Amino acid sequence: MGLQELADRLREARRSLAPIPQLTVAEPGLTVGQAYEVQRLLTADLQRSGYKMGLTSLAKQREVGVSSAIRGVLLKDDVISNGGTTPRTRYIHPRSEPEIVFLLKHDLKGDASEAEIRSAISAVHIGLEVIDSRYRDFKFTLPDVIADNTSAAGYVIGDRIDVPLSDLPGLEVTLSKNGAPAQKAKAEAILGDPFRSLVELIKLTPLGVPAGPVLAGGVTQSVPFESGDVIEASCATGARAWFRAV
Ligand code: OOG
Ligand code: MG
């Protein structure tokens, strides 16, 4: 089966909300490189708004049983405003997780140095991601989840986190559902320092990264939600990101 056909299968699952078997069942030899090409084909005609990293914390790697960091693209259509609503009917089996969001004020080349990456950051925000695997039972291998644009399905950019970059790792982040804390971890859960996730993004993106938001990866495991649920990520500075499913 060609890579375009694999992308078409995922596109159809996104459209119909009917989950599909993992691509690697039919194509066990699918490589990581080919999976990124499927991701590119899948998102080629959609408007991009930024990038995301995934599986950058042990908590997330354990949740899905895949242990390499992955890169996906954020889509304009998937933006959820902070404090806004998202229809449950947009998703198959949605989950949400707390994210650290870097805002890049200018483009970064694929060979950008760490100093250049650092100086491109205009602000850091607390955020939430909605993930929704297009695979049955939310189960996948590394190439499967890369091809499926890393389960990306929605994101909220919340309040600005007003701490120096060097204090970010020590920041405690809480994920709550309907007011009850569900998960808690320090931002250092992301590769020891969420900034490392940006460095990994540049390594995975030789063509460079445009100005805009970058999600560094779930700080904790995700929680499932249904319509009526309020999901919130908050941190010790008081910054929060939240949405309600309707
Ligand atoms: C894969 C996407 C992982 C993260 O932040 O770690 C991700 C998944 O969990 O379905 O977005
Ligand atoms: Mg995520």
Image (cartoon, rainbow, N blue to C red):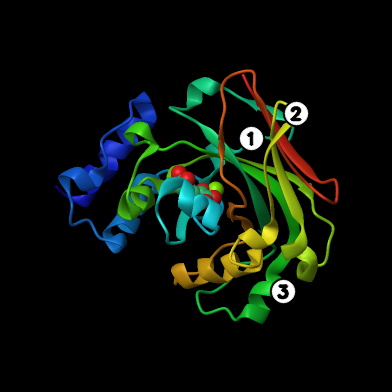
Q: Position of residue 86 (x, y in %)?
A: 60, 26
From the viewer's perspective, is residue 26 above or below residue 204? Answer: above
Tell whether 104 sits left or right of 7. right
**Residue 80: mark in rendering:** 1
The residue where tag 3 is placed is 119
Front label number (1 vs 2) = 2
Q: Residue at x 33, y 45 (%)?
A: 140
Q: Is residue 225 above or below residue 68?
A: above
- State left or right for residue 94 relative to residue 23: right
Q: Quadrant of the C terminus?
A: top right
In this view, the residue in front, 10 or 106, is 10
Dot 1 amino acid type: Ile
Q: Position of residue 116 (x, y in %)?
A: 65, 78
Tell me which label, 1 or 2, sits earlier in the chain.
1
Find disc 2 in the rendering and name its residue.
179
In primary-sequence order, the first of circles 1 and 3 is 1
Kind of residue at disc 3: Ser
